[in-house]
Amino acid sequence: MSKTTTITKLERQLLCDLAKSDHSSDGHGFTMWVGVGYESLPMRQVRALITTLQEKKVIYYSPPNPRYEEPGWIGPREEFVEGGERKTGQRKDGSTWVEIEPDHDKFCGDWNSDPFTDGIHGYRYKNLKVI
């Protein structure tokens, strides 16, 4: 059984933004490009929250790739999301990719659903407690 990790209300807000981003609805799990407008918080706060969520081992962060003009991205670690079959692998640069088949029957929430209680896009957060 996985232990519960505590998060702040602001960390929860960033995780909600992540779950409701356009990329989270495309069938690859909760994923969000950073700095392209999905955040509801100022970027200074977002960067700080990414750091604290990484330190708590709640999310992965992949930095921007200027060579390909790609922004950075974040996504939750496996132990904090339920729904769907998860596949992972390593890219040549050492970063990790994740592919997840969504479970729309179990977590069929719409864009306004809470990803912590109802689930959204076939997934739901788990093992997180807001303090």
Image: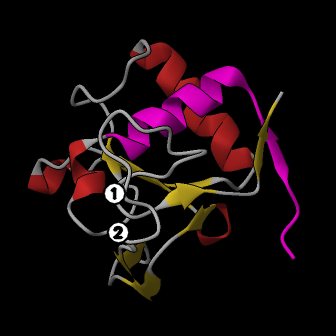
Which three-letter amino acid code belongs to the residue tagged 1? His
Observer able to see residue 48: yes
Q: Residue at x 54, y 26 (%)?
A: 13
Q: Secondary structure at mark 2?
A: loop
Q: Which residue is mark 2?
A: 104
Residue wearing tag 1: 121
Q: Is residue 39 left or right of residue 117?
A: left
Coordinates of residue 101 in the picture (x, y in percent): 34, 80
Q: Is residue 50 left or right of residue 84?
A: right
Q: How far from the left and from the top, in percent, is residue 127?
A: 76, 57
The residue lying at 30 percent from left, 54 percent from top is 24
Question: Where are the magenta residues, as a range?
Answer: 1-20
- If you read the primary sequence from the N terminus, does the residue marked by circle 2 or circle 1 appear first? 2
Query: Real-space Cα distance between discs 2 and 1?
Result: 6 Å
Q: Amino acid at mark 2?
A: His
Q: Nearer the viewer, residue 31 or 113?
A: 113
| Mark 1 neighbour class, 10 Å CA radius: few under 14, some 14 to 19, many 20 or more | many
